[in-house]
Image (cartoon, rainbow, N blue to C red):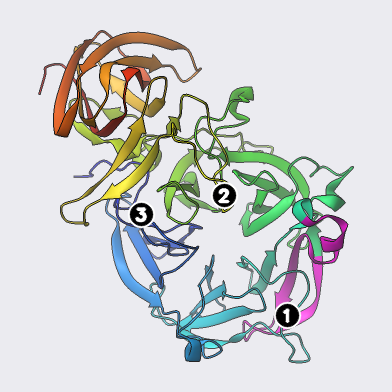
Amino acid sequence: MQDLVFNPYLPFWEYVPDGEPHVFGDRLYVYGSHDRRDGASYCQEDYVVWSAPVNDLSQWRCEGVSYHRTDDPRHAATGGADLMAPDVAQGPDGRYYLYYCDDMTAIGVAVSDVPEGPFAYLDIVRTAGGEPLADGSPFDPGVLVDEGRVWLYWGFDPSKFLGEEAVDRSGAFVVELEADMHTCKGSPVKIAPGYVESKGTSFEGHAFFEASSPRRIGDRYYFVYSSELGHELCYATAPAPTGPFAFGGTIVSIADVGYRGNTVEQAYPANTHGGLVCVGGQWYVFYHRHTHKRQYSRQGCAERIEIERDGSIPQVEMTSCGLNGGPLPTGAVYPAHIACGIRGPEGVVHISTHRHRRPSDPYLVQEGDRETGSMVAANLQDGAELTFKYFAFTGAERACAITARGSFEGTVEVLSITPAGEVARIGEVAVGPAEQWQSQAGSIEIPAAMLGVRLVPRGTGALDVRDIYLGVDQL
């Protein structure tokens, strides 16, 4: 029997951002970077691969370490370099090729006989003359094998921050590879402009920043990327692997900016990276979110998407249910870390390496180890918001309970949210100070419908929430 699955889709203690999803055989594999809990920088761990059967996306398993930081001989003597956003493709020879970057000077290639690895170092991507690929910035590689031909995409655009001086290295590029999977065949082609060069093009306002991810869907070629805004994954389409690509739109924003015209950030914006995959006829977008008050502890999420007949992809919102295939049933206790929206009483600030959160900002943080710990929503103060989407309410639910602790004293308003964004008050939970985790219960009245739930503290002090229960009776 299939279990429930929510966002993030991996265990609370795992941090695999930059996820590139691919179906090989009867399993869905996700290849990504590997962050550290409360990390001090990006991608501090070795690559790991997670997979799930295509007929049950709730059953994820870790396939183990697929590539070590020291497996690249260029960096083995120094203890290895940070392994950043990778991609994997099955080559025409049937083997599986891992493409990665570590120091932004070259794109590395490793190979395995099986999709989960382990992968063995092969070489770096080289020009026909044997030199390292140098056009643009060799960063965030994405690979597409299409009718026996191999196309490598990459790029990075700092021009929004550095200006005209960075234009010669800005934008996204593609080149065809030889059958050896690491030698360029011909010259690279720029397919998407960076910030400065996007002026007057279809990409203006959503220029290429990073996170190249190519797919072929029908007769169209899709190029998914992270835009100059950082918090969104956008897409462009073309009739051929080399373009010309035209901007298509935003697929998902980790702050829900742009969804249904929304201009208010519903969560803390920062970078995101991911790709598209079709499982059982349903398309999904994979992306990542941020935890621990920083950009260095990122977790993978996913949402169902639709591809219209004209090839367009309407923007989707962040949800708590993600891969579940529908809203979550009531009558169960759900961990607070599946919240898809979190805002402080002063709104949100962009999480970056240069700006830190304010004392009133809430955040998600892991406590304890993987066996006995959890990830909690911490520091919820008066006027903060913690949002979950969506639950399948039957209309019989009368109880809401949260497991909470902290100095907070007051009430927690319980609000419902329709898919159209309409908000209504459905009850409250009285909360008093508690040094240890304590269940706090209240009453709700709610109609039968698919609805989100938002918790809003009203009082003094700070509140941590570990889980939430919505049901017919009190626990």
- Element marked by disc 2: loop
Location of the C terminus (image quadrant):
top left
Q: Amino acid at mark 3?
A: Val
Q: Position of residue 68 (x, y in %)?
A: 41, 80
Whether residue 316 is situated above or below residue 195 in the rendered picture = above
Q: Position of residue 210 (x, y in %)?
A: 66, 57
* Nearer-the-camera pick, 141 or 246: 141
The residue identified by callout 1 is 133
Label 3–label 2 contact, CB within 8 A: no
Q: What is the magenta range?
A: 162-189
- Element marked by disc 3: loop
Please name which of the two marks, 1 or 3, marks the residue nearer to the observer: 1
Mark 3 packing: few (<14 Cα in 10 Å), some, or many (20+)? Answer: some
Q: Position of residue 231 (x, y in %)?
A: 59, 43
- Residue 54's disc is 3
* Nearer-the-camera pick, 89 or 204: 204
Q: Amino acid at mark 1?
A: Leu
The residue identified by callout 2 is 352
* Nearer-the-camera pick, 174 or 413: 413
